[in-house]
Amino acid sequence: MQSPEQLKRQEELNRKLKENLGRIRKKLLVLSNKGGVGKSFVATSLALIAARRGLQTGLLDADIHGPSVAHMLGFAGMPLGVTEDNVIEPIPVRENLVAVSTASLLKSQDDSVIWRGPLKMGLLKQFLAEVRWGELDLLIVDSPPGTGDEPLSIAQLIPEMSGAVVVTSPQDIALLDSRKCISFLNQLKIPTLGILENLSGMLCPYCGKPIDVFKQGGGKQAAADLGVPFLGAIPIDPEIVRASDDGKPYVLEHPDSEAAKVLEAIIEEVGKL
Ligand SMILES: Nc1ncnc2c1ncn2[C@@H]1O[C@H](COP(=O)(O)OP(=O)(O)OP(=O)(O)O)[C@@H](O)[C@H]1O
Ligand SMILES: [Mg+2]
């Protein structure tokens, strides 16, 4: 049972959540079943491209245990601002782009967050309700791997989610992984924008010929089998690892790369939602 004070607090949060979401035109979820397939790279790159196109963009790092957005965008260690009236200010990353991550709440990058479901739901609710996101054209949410507490909380907190991008690897297992994500999205009535295959082959830096490090085509096949759009394939580029480690905007610095082309096309699709 909640005390009257707790109930009042929840009512206040629900009101602020509704107000905040009402000022955000489109909301996009990035998810995958497996870890390390490139969700955070995709989510941050989509946010950078949208902002460069002049869209007011927000990026919420919903990966509470393994936040990597802050590092990739070069704001690791920067604390969130809080105004006198207890409003949380998002981190101004660059023109048209603001972001929020639990990384900003940790004293050290080595600290870990040991929280169970309800607490995580509470934090994500606060991030959505009490952050001054302002008027946004697009809010992108980067999920941790899987279909657990965080994406479920996000789906419940943002019932009007505009769409979701499922990131997968090119192996055969992609079908199994993507099936779980698509089933999750269908159950929560979130429109699936499509499946994106990342880590899809690599061009040999010496001879220029493609090398299928993790095979190729699993994501495309999964999209065909599951009857959802295929959003394209991004090859492995060692420059992406370097840029992510240095907090540099790879897609803006390499506008002719396959990654930039595929991700630009996704932002075009988001525009149609
Ligand atoms: N196409 C690519 N080529 C080379 N490196 C990549 C590519 N995509 C992502 N990476 C790198 O792979 C690593 C893992 O990517 P990322 O953190 O985006 O995965 P993730 O799915 O968010 O992981 P997690 O499940 O842990 O949240 C990062 O160092 C990232 O820079
Ligand atoms: Mg991630």
Image (cartoon, rainbow, N blue to C red):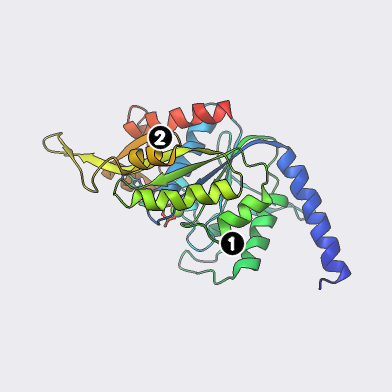
Residue annotated with mark 2: 230
Is residue 241 visible in the rendered image? The answer is yes
Farthest residue, direction right: 4
Of residues 220 and 251, the one nearer the viewer is 220
Q: Separation of disc 2 and disc 1 at Cα?
A: 36 Å
What residue lies at 77% left-to-right and 43% top-to-bottom?
19
Of residues 86 and 20, the one nearer the viewer is 20
Quadrant where the C terminus sits is top right
Farthest residue, direction left: 207
Residue type at tag 1: Leu
Residue type at tag 2: Phe
Of residues 70 and 144, the one nearer the viewer is 144
Quadrant of residue 35 in the image?
Answer: bottom left
Asked whether, in this view, residue 81 is left or right of residue 36, the answer is right
Does ligand 1 reach within 8 Å of label 2's beta carbon?
Answer: no
Residue 105 circle label = 1
Find residue 113 and report its horizontal and vertical position in percent: 54, 69
Number of marks in the image? Answer: 2
**Dot placed on the residue nearer the N-terminal end, 2 or 1:** 1
Find residue 129 and report its horizontal and vertical position in percent: 72, 51
Asked whether, in this view, residue 168 is left or right of residue 119, the answer is left
